[in-house]
Image: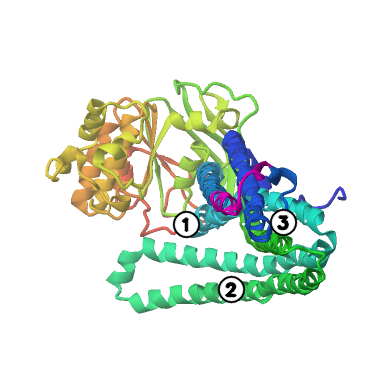
Amino acid sequence: MSAHAAPRTPGPFQLAVPYLRPERGRLLLGAGAAGLEIACRLLAPWPLALAIDHALAGRPLTGPMRALAGLDRSGLLVAAGVATVVLSTLGGLLGTLRTSISERAAERVGGALRAALFAHVLSLSLRWHDRTCTGEVISRLTSDVSRLLDALVSICRAVVPNALLLVGALTILATVDPRLAALGLIVLPVVAWLTVHQPRRLRAAELAAREASGRMTATASDLLCNVRAVQAFGRLDRAAAIFGRPNRRAVAAEMRAVGTGARWAPVPDILIAVGTGAVLVAGGLQLGSGLLTVGEFVVVLMYLGDLQSPIRSLVRLASVRAKAGVSAARLHEVLGCPEAVPEPRVPRPVPPVWEGLRLESVWFSYAEGRPVLADFDLTVAAAETVCLFGPRGAGKSTVLQLLLRLYDVDAGRVVVDGVDVRELSPIELRHQLAFVPQDPWLLDGTIAENIAFGSCTATRAQVLAAGRSAWVDEFAVFLPEGYDTPLGECGVRLSCGQRRRVALARAVVSAAPVILLDELTASLDAEAARQVVGAIRSATRDRTVLLATHDPVLAAIADRTVYVAPEWRDDSVPVAGQVLPPQAAAQPGTPNSDSAVATSAGRVSG
């Protein structure tokens, strides 16, 4: 490979190797069971030869069969029947054990792989998530992992036993009659060529099918997440049509992949049948001339039949491996993605926020050449409540996300007690900053479980205390099971204001000294907004608070209000970065979302 060649994408087995290591003992046990199973299968034709050549035809016993020399014809027939039953039973039990071990191991490997993939996806930068559909990620977590597991099970169930069967049957055939063995296997090079080249044709078709399936899953996920809007507008037909397009493309792509595989599926069987037919003719001629006994001829045919099964299985395994190779590439694309917020090589201890937070000459853009923050400065003292006030799109929420280090700045610094956040562990930093977004996500669990999510050590008493301080009690006491009432997916059983109070309680139950609040009264009616403002006043005492809003009522609770605006302005609005007293933010002349419109390329300072 040249120095500039792209790194080779690992195959399904290589991708799974790190997750297979804990299963080594069980897999070795399965391989042992497979070896014994194949030994039983290789011995299975000889009781039939014993019955035909020695019990019925009266030929003298040779080799290991001389141990049965004292038996008469009936005894030899009984011995042949018992041996057939014992070998079949033992082989079946060993096959069941092998299958159970391989499938259990594959499921454990699949669970570990899904967990690793999910954890890695959670660690990736929000820039990656901004451009990646959730449905596409779910498709890789489910469909692609399942296809990889199918391949692993097939490899575990087919490669070892079929390889042993192939080698054993070829060895015995060559011992019994080398010429018939060579005649039966003359088609093997052609079958091997198909095994190598068929997956190459299938891989491109399978890749197109997996990508189409991922787009279909992404569309379905998007529509189902917005099912209330679909029903509210009465646009079931429109939503069905939107889903129908990627669904039809996925079906068409799958049909092309199926057609590509189906065209080649019968070829190995035809080639093997040709070899078997040739052996049948040649063996029959040898039988007629006395060069081969009936029992030996039957044994040869049975071993040739045994050869057909592993050859077919290995050819089909190549097809399964081709499909799994596409899924492995899609999984590796995510697992190999480096777009995580980088951890410092030697992270410094996170300071306790005794001094405060600062943004120093910060530049940041979501898209190249379109800065959202330009030369932005902000200082928040410890135990101070500061409001970032301004219109939507001015960059207020971006400031909160930079403090959390969900994104890294393009230039400048974000510091906590004088320490650059890039020198701190992102996880440890976020333990010091509790974030309540405008659209708080809630687990499909109870109120108590959602509040407790903010702290891994919270007791029931602390959860209830946090609920009281965030005014969750006002509605929780009227619910059927109080704090143990299930909320449904995304907290659908609560109003918007109630969900925000639960999210606020989740921030309060944490030990974080800093609370970041993002537009908590947006889209609420006056009464719901009043309750949220009251909950914020109650819940944030003695903590450092930075709140972003364009609501003058919420801004009025801050110790200090900093106006944040786009680069353009007119003479009737405050200058960007101007500090407003609390009462000024509530005046009618102060800009809000109705009097100023931010642009994504605006210059912001504070």
Which residue was labeled with disc 1? 598
Image coordinates of residue 479 in percent, x first then y, are 14, 45
Q: Give whichever of discs 3 and 2 has the lower sequence position.
A: 3
Left or right relative to 555: residue 39: right
Depth order, front residue of 278/112? 278
Whether residue 567 is visible to the viewer of this picture, yes or no, is no
**Eyeballing the image, is 380 above or below 120?**
above
- Describe the element under mark 3 as helix, strand or loop: loop
Q: Disc 3 designates what residue?
A: 59
84, 311: nearer the viewer: 84
Q: Main secondary structure of the magenta part?
A: helix
Query: Would residue 237 appear left or right of 476 to someone viewing this image?
Result: right
Membership of 243 in magenta stretch: no
Viewer-proximal residue among 472 and 3: 3
Specify start and end residues of the magenta stretch as a single range. 67-82
Instruction: Out of 298 and 467, give the one closest to the viewer.
Output: 298
Amino acid carrying label 2: it is: Ala
Amino acid carrying label 3: it is Arg
Q: In this view, does 544 lie above or below 485?
A: above
Q: What's the residue at 68%, 57% (across, down)?
A: 58
Report the residue marked by disc 2.
Answer: 253
> Gap between marks 3 and 2, in whole Å?
61 Å
Identity of the residue furthest to the right in this view: 2
Q: First in sequence: mark 1 or mark 3?
A: 3
Image-based side of 299 in relation to 486, left or right: right
